[in-house]
Image (tube, rainbow, N blue to C red):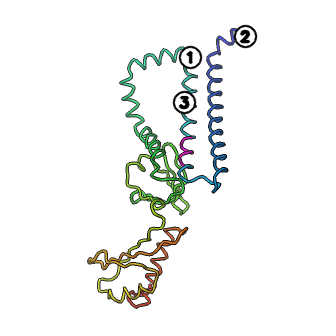
Amino acid sequence: MDQTFWEANGDWISAAITIGVATLIALGVDRFLLGRAERATESMETSEFSREARTRLRLIRRLLFVAIILFGVALALSQFASIKRFATGILASTAVLGLVIGFAGRTVIANFVAGLLMAIRQPIRIGDRIAIGEDVEGRVIDIALTYTSVDRGDGSLLVVPNEKVVNEVVTNHSAGDARAPVTVELLLPIDVDMEAAHRALEDTDVARVRVREVGVDGVRLELKAEMDPGRDRATRESELREHALAALRGAGLLRPA
């Protein structure tokens, strides 16, 4: 009776055991990597991981987990003789199969490859404030294998395909020299008294004033100011605009709001 049951269901039982073992191994590897990261963090003077290390670790953990599960599923499927024969026939026409998979999964594959490139090159990291084109701006809260999650700060969450991140121009406001001056632009009336404007802005924290453009819409000024250590750049830019506008209005160069 036992032999008959095993003959009838042995392949399914072996497949289930294989997938279960693969899942346990994947979870074990994930916990091992997380534990090593925690021990490494404790040994550091700052007691915290950098954003680069945190981003890389998260992507590596997910990649290994998926790879182990897929390998386990492949081993489980190999238990069935019918699937083996089917796989043999498929392998005989790998060129056709490759074309079909390439066309059907082009977007998924492209996003996956882009995720690997991002893990290696790290153009953005978790916690960075970024802008992609004109429709994506916010803070990165997660980078997965195929997508990146961006918090816009207004209660909404953007899920951006990794291919878009790799192929489009990305402005990373959190990278570069943190001490670099903040830069903002103001548009003034075409008939503004520039000497009076310079005198008014001298009493603010503006370090440099430059006429960037003169057009039919008015005079566009570029203002630069020092960046305080530890300050948020977006907040500092907003303060600079407010101070400059208040000074110009106080000098009678702008109409009251």
Count of marks, rendered view: 3
Q: Nearer the viewer, residue 243 or 33?
A: 33
Q: Amino acid at mark 3?
A: Leu
How far separated are the C-alphas under marks 1 and 2?
20 Å
Mark 1 near mark 3, Cβ–Cβ under 8 Å? no
**In front: 150, or 203?**
203
Magenta span: predominant SS is helix
**Callout 3: SS:** helix
Circle 2: element type: helix
Segment tinted magenta in the rendering: 55-60
**Which residue is under mark 2?**
2
- Let me know if residue 59 is in the magenta part: yes
Q: Which residue is mark 3?
A: 70
In the drawing, does residue 214 fall left or right of residue 147?
A: left
Residue appearing at x 44%, y 71% in the figure? 182
The residue drawn where x is 37% and y is 85% is: 198
Q: Earlier in the sequence, mark 3 or mark 2?
A: 2
Q: Nearer the viewer, mark 1 or mark 3?
A: 3
Residue at label 1? 80
Comparing marks 3 and 2, which lies closer to the viewer?
3
